């Protein structure tokens, strides 16, 4: 996937809610305006495969954000189970810190049936937090190291913060997918995001997919909020 000079970044709406019917309703309303939706642990653990199916049947591709992290065999089999969901997710993810054997097993299990991306270092972790779990050095170095490992192991991309996109692009090239949360339209509240970027800035840094939750889901008119973001992205892509 090449970057912002040619392409509009895609919009993925994070449906962070436990109520599958509400999530599916929102997904239906946003169809045609946004490019995909993200279903995470909250919804999947509460509503299971049935809840997932309700959302997926709205017709938008689903990023199933369950961040698997276990021994290689268990992760591979877990991914195989997730690919049997109907309709299957478009994007799945695992923790890069599961290590090379786990990442390779994950990539083999998915075998191109979905995009498989890695979580590098959770943005909630500071340098001190990393030291506390025995990871020396600045978070930025760990992010680049784990992103490179993900690529070498056959994964399609990473989830990363707006601050990391440009460095990952420079190090790993244009065909490595960057999925970027922490997006806030100019003038919007930050909620609990500490290092947010506007949609345009993240697109300009090379983000392929922008994960946007509350600025759309909590807006008085979610469809209008999504449309405004889409228009801003289209205006600034060539
Ligand atoms: O509501 P908001 O736009 O902050 O939602 C962002 C989404 O991206 C949430 O689902 C959140 O869990 C996820 N995310 C994040 N920061 C990361 C990784 C994922 O905000 N570093």
Image: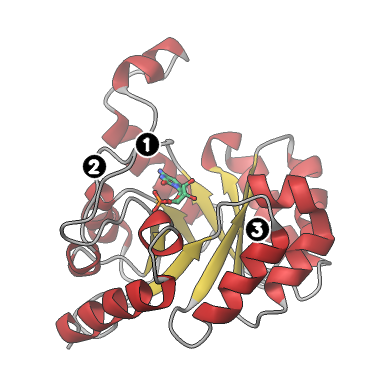
Which quarter of the figure is the C terminus placed in?
Answer: bottom left
Q: Please tell me which residue lies in front, 60 or 31.
A: 31
> The residue tagged with tag 2: helix, strand or loop?
loop
The furthest residue to the top? 132
- Mark 1 CB near ligand 1 (8 Å cut): yes
Q: Residue at (17%, 85%) from the top-left corner?
A: 235
Where is mark 2, residue-wise?
195
Where is mark 1, residue-wise?
123
Q: Please tell me which residue lies in front, 93 or 193.
A: 193
Relative to 219, does residue 153 appear above or below in the rendering? above
- Give the mark nearer the N terminus: 2 vs 1: 1
| Left or right of residue 128: residue 58 | right
Q: How many marks?
A: 3
- Give the mark nearer the N terminus: 1 vs 3: 3
Contact? badges 2 and 1 (CB < 8 Å): yes
Q: Residue at (79%, 50%) from the top-left corner?
A: 78
Q: Please tell me which residue lies in front, 109 or 49.
A: 49
Q: Residue at (16%, 60%) from the top-left corner?
A: 186
Which quarter of the figure is the N terminus placed in?
Answer: bottom left
Mark on residue 107?
3
């Amino acid at each position: 996937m090449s970057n912002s000079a040619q392409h509009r970044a895609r919009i993925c709406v994070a449906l962070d809610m436990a109520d599958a019917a509400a999530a599916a309703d929102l997904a239906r309303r946003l169809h045609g305006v946004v490019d995909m939706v993200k279903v995470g642990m909250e919804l999947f653990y509460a509503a299971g495969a049935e809840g997932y199916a309700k959302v997926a049947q709205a017709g938008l591709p689903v990023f199933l954000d369950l961040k698997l992290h276990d021994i290689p065999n268990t992760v591979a089999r877990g991914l195989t189970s997730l690919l049997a969901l109907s309709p299957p997710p478009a994007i799945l993810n695992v923790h890069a810190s599961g290590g090379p054997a786990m990442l390779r097993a994950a990539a083999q299990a998915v075998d191109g049936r979905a995009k498989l991306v890695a979580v590098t270092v959770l943005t909630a972790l500071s340098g001190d937090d990393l030291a506390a779990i025995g990871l020396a050095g600045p978070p930025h170095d760990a992010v680049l190291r784990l992103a490179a490992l993900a690529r070498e192991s056959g994964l399609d991309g990473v989830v990363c913060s707006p601050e990391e996109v440009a460095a990952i692009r420079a190090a790993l090239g244009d065909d490595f997918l960057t999925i970027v949360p922490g997006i806030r339209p100019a003038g919007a509240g930050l909620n609990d995001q500490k290092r947010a970027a506007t949609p345009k800035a993240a697109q300009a840094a090379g983000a392929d997919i922008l994960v946007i939750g509350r600025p759309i889901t909590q807006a008085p008119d979610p469809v209008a909020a999504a449309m405004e973001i889409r228009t801003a992205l289209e205006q600034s892509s060539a």
